[in-house]
């Protein structure tokens, strides 16, 4: 199988189901941003981190591939004539969202209470978490914009919302694990 197909040379691409849309279409922006997020999470995984976090990130990356496939499916062609769904994979569900919540609860047990916003940074690893978090928020914004004009599984949006929270808590945990400095944002007071 060749990687290049030449079918996109005119600036369009095919959705799962066969319909073609411009490469700048909001649906493409949505799943493209999820792909960018997945790559950033792969960057976090490339650092020396604890095995549990690494395994959780692998699960998340798999969930993001599912979300990407869901977003890449033309809703008008999502169901075959037989009544079966075209996308024959387990979709993101409440159980996968609960995994993120459980992981946050577990990590928060070991973290000091948060009383201020945290300035992103502290180390390349922690910064990678914050970059992934902000890309996740952008993916969420793209998905919610798409949902205003087309059908989007609400659990996709819920998952992305929860994932950005998870990435914030992971950044805090990895700051502690690596003894990186966590700097609170203290706003300047006006006179």
Image (cartoon, rainbow, N blue to C red):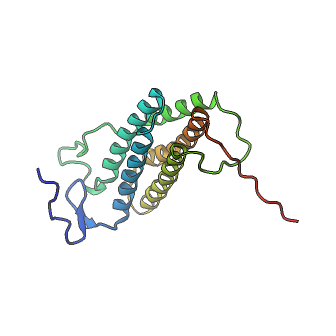
**Which residue is situated farthest in the left direction here?**
1
The picture quadrant where one finds residue 111 is top right
Give the image location of residue 92, x and y in percent: 39, 39
Q: Residue at x 71, y 47 (%)?
A: 184
- 75 horizontally vs 101: left or right: left
Figure label count: 0
Q: Quadrant of residue 105?
A: top right
Whether 11 is drawn above or below 94: the answer is below
**Horizontal arrangement in the rendering, residue 131 relative to residue 22 (left or right):** right
Q: Position of residue 144 (x, y in %)?
A: 47, 57
**Which residue: 56% across, 36% down?**
174
Q: Which quadrant of the figure contains the C terminus?
A: bottom right
Which residue appears farthest toward the right when viewing the image?
191
Image x and y of residue 123, in percent: 56, 45
Of residues 155 and 139, the one nearer the viewer is 139
Instruction: Give the vertical position of 81 relative to 149 (above or below).
Output: above
Residue 156: x percent and y percent?
A: 43, 46
- Image point (46%, 61%), residue name: 145
Viewer-closest of 175 and 88: 175
Q: Which residue is rendered at x = 70% and y = 40% of the image?
A: 114
């Amino acid at each position: 199988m060749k990687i290049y197909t030449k079918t996109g040379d005119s600036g369009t691409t095919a959705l799962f189901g066969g319909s073609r849309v411009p490469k700048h279409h909001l649906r493409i922006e949505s799943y493209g941003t999820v792909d960018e997020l997945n790559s950033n999470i792969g960057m976090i995984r490339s650092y020396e981190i604890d095995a549990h976090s690494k395994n959780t990130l692998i699960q998340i990356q798999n969930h993001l591939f599912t979300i990407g496939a869901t977003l890449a499916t033309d809703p008008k062609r999502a169901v075959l004539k037989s009544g079966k769904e075209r996308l024959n994979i387990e979709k993101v569900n409440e159980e996968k969202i609960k995994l993120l919540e459980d992981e946050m609860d577990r990590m928060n047990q070991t973290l000091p209470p948060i009383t201020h916003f945290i300035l992103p940074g502290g180390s390349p690893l922690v910064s990678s978490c914050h970059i992934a978090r902000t890309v996740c928020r952008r993916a969420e914004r793209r998905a919610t914009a798409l949902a205003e004009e087309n059908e989007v599984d609400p659990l996709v949006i819920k998952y992305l919302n929860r994932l950005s929270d998870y990435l914030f808590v992971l950044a805090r945990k990895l700051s502690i694990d690596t003894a990186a400095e966590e700097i609170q944002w203290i706003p300047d007071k006006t006179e």
